[in-house]
Amino acid sequence: MAQNVYSIKKEMCEIGKRIWQKGFCAGNEGNHSVRISDNRVLTTPTGISKGFLTPDMICTVDMEGKQIDTSNKYKRTSEVLVHLAIYKKRPDVKAVIHSHPPHATTFAIAQIPLPEGIHPEAEVFLGRVPTAPYATPSKQDLPDSITPLIGPQTNSVLMGNHGSVSFSTSLIDTYYKLEILDAYCRILLLTKQLGHANILNAQQMTELLEVKKKFGLPDERLACSAQGCVGEVNDPFLASFNDVRPSTACECGGGNVTHSTSTSGAMGDAEFETLVQTITDQILAGS
């Protein structure tokens, strides 16, 4: 048993290094844990970079957060209460990672829900990712803000103005969830730069969720996907595609900036003709 626990500690150090190398945490940010029994959890220490962990730094706590290995000079993370709340809510969960992946944290700061029905991999491996309201770190308010959002199929939650928390049946799979979450958010931000997002229709989503079910990953949205329930949280993200277009070549010399009212981001023929004429008149006036 002792060797098994030591192996888990080594794995926690390796995952910590990967988290740090991916830029998901800076300085001594972030924390992760593994549940090893009904009343024992291994957790990362406070004040230590996740890129420089060693097995002797890993702390052991009970399910109330009390540190058991009192001879350990390292102290458990102050945010272990978040991990314990998740373990209590979901007994099937065996590992939790809290981090600050930059692209996902951007959505958490903007309080823009992650859209659905856009990227197949995100739908299969993440599903619906809720966003918790802001709560002060290291206080009970933080786990209290997260746990009501965790359903039987939830594996990731965005923490308002803070970061993310991912959880699964193993530490490796939990780390995969974290990587996929930030990759999806990065894709969304790049998509916004192009100014258009193609949304999968109800039939496409139904087919995708049926494939997901065959993978052994049930998704409660399958029951209503044919009626278009997937994507009902998309409005805030799609609204961010409303672009700003100058009605003249620049704002100097009496130019002004107008906002397009098109939700698709596409310029209508009349608007385009007006823009071309305005720019042409300005060029001729300056010649």
Image (cartoon, rainbow, N blue to C red):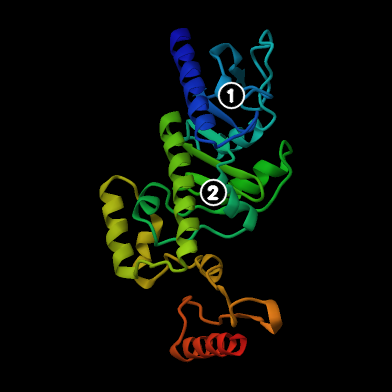
Q: Residue at x 35, y 66 (%)?
A: 200
The C terminus: image quadrant: bottom right
Residue tagged by mark 2?
Answer: 103
Is 128 drawn above or below residue 280 in the view shown? Answer: above
Q: Residue at x 67, y 45 (%)?
A: 144
Is 35 drawn above or below residue 262 in the view shown? Answer: above
Q: How crowded is the residue under tag 1: few (<14 C-alpha within 10 Å), some, or many (20+)?
A: many
Q: Left or right? Give the position of 205 relative to 110.
A: left
Q: Tell me the amino acid under the disc marked 1.
A: Thr
Q: Residue at x 64, y 53 (%)?
A: 109
**Residue in the foreground of this view, choosing between 66 and 31:** 31
Circle 1/circle 2 CB separation < 8 Å: no
Residue tagged by mark 1?
Answer: 43
Residue 260: x %, y % from top left: 56, 80
The N terminus: image quadrant: top left
Q: How crowded is the residue under tag 2: few (<14 C-alpha within 10 Å), some, or many (20+)?
A: some
Q: Quadrant of residue 100?
A: top right
Residue 176: x %, y % from top left: 42, 37
Q: Residue at x 67, y 24 (%)?
A: 46
Is 133 drawn above or below residue 266 in the view shown? Answer: above
Residue 184: x %, y % from top left: 44, 51
**Residue in the foreground of this view, choosing between 286 and 84:** 286
For the question of whether residue 39 can be seen, the reply is: no
